[in-house]
Image: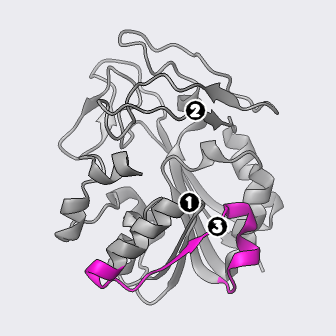
Amino acid sequence: MPIHERSDFYDVAGFKAGKSTLMPVEVEEVGDVAGKSLLHLQCHFGLDTMSWARLGAKATGVDFSEPAIALARSLSDELAIDVRFVHSNVYDLPENLEGRFDIVFTSYGAVNWLPDLAGWARVVSHFLKPGGTFYVIDGHPFTWGLDDENPDDIIIRYPYFRSDEPLKFEADGKGSYANETAVVTTATREWAHTMGDILNFLISAGLQIEFLHEFPFVCWEALPMMQKGEDGWWRLPEGRESLPFLFSVRASNRE
């Protein structure tokens, strides 16, 4: 949290000055949120949640990190943004939050941390009003399998299909995605989920898929050879093979 709070990647100072942290894709695909209740799962320290509130949503953000929620509450109080933040593991949320929402939202670096995708989809369904909208935008499952340390070639390094055992990344002192010079000493565990897994678990939870979109760009430097455009998106160099780096799914509650 301290690394992310101070990083240029999150640009807290810019947010305080009025900058939105939402990318144009999700704003367009989610649609008008004014006056609607919105639940943001895995909200980190709440900049996107508060950006939705600035667009008129009655927003609630949830994260399992107590320091992240503490910072989110501090920022929302400082900036007088009316947002509710809940400290909870996403799977335990039905025990810690009441009500249903017009929109359930999650984004960017969320799905890979989930060991139980079926349980996640059930939580989404639990909190979505009849006729409500669920929206996720995240790194494409194919992209998570690529070697993110090779500066010259595009190489598949990690499995595409899910295993019961997570991918284990031990602490090596390398930087965070938000700050390459920071020393990170925390080991991580991540889970691979296929595109089919994501769609099918949402369908099994009672949601109706409205669309699946795939994009050849991403909002972080997913591979060392990627180049950042003026629009803020990272892409492969011109002439390199185009690959999917992001996906978005919008679904509705069939109740």
- Dot 2: few (<14), some (14–19), or many (≥20) neighbours within 10 Å? few
In this rendering, position of residue 85 left or right of residue 25? right
What amino acid is found at the position of numbered circle 1 in the picture? Gln
| Image mark for residue 126 | none
* Distance of label 1 from label 3 (alpha carbons): 9 Å
* Stretch in magenta: 77-100
Q: Can residue 49 be spotted in the picture?
A: no
What amino acid is found at the position of numbered circle 2 in the picture? Ala
* Distance of label 2 from label 1 (alpha carbons): 19 Å
Q: Which image quarter: residue 224? A: top left
- Give the residue at mark 2: 187
| Image mark for residue 42 | 1
- Residue farthest bottom in this picture: 35
- Dot 3: few (<14), some (14–19), or many (≥20) neighbours within 10 Å? many
In this rendering, position of residue 238 left or right of residue 109? left
In this rendering, position of residue 217 left or right of residue 108? left
- Give the residue at mark 3: 88
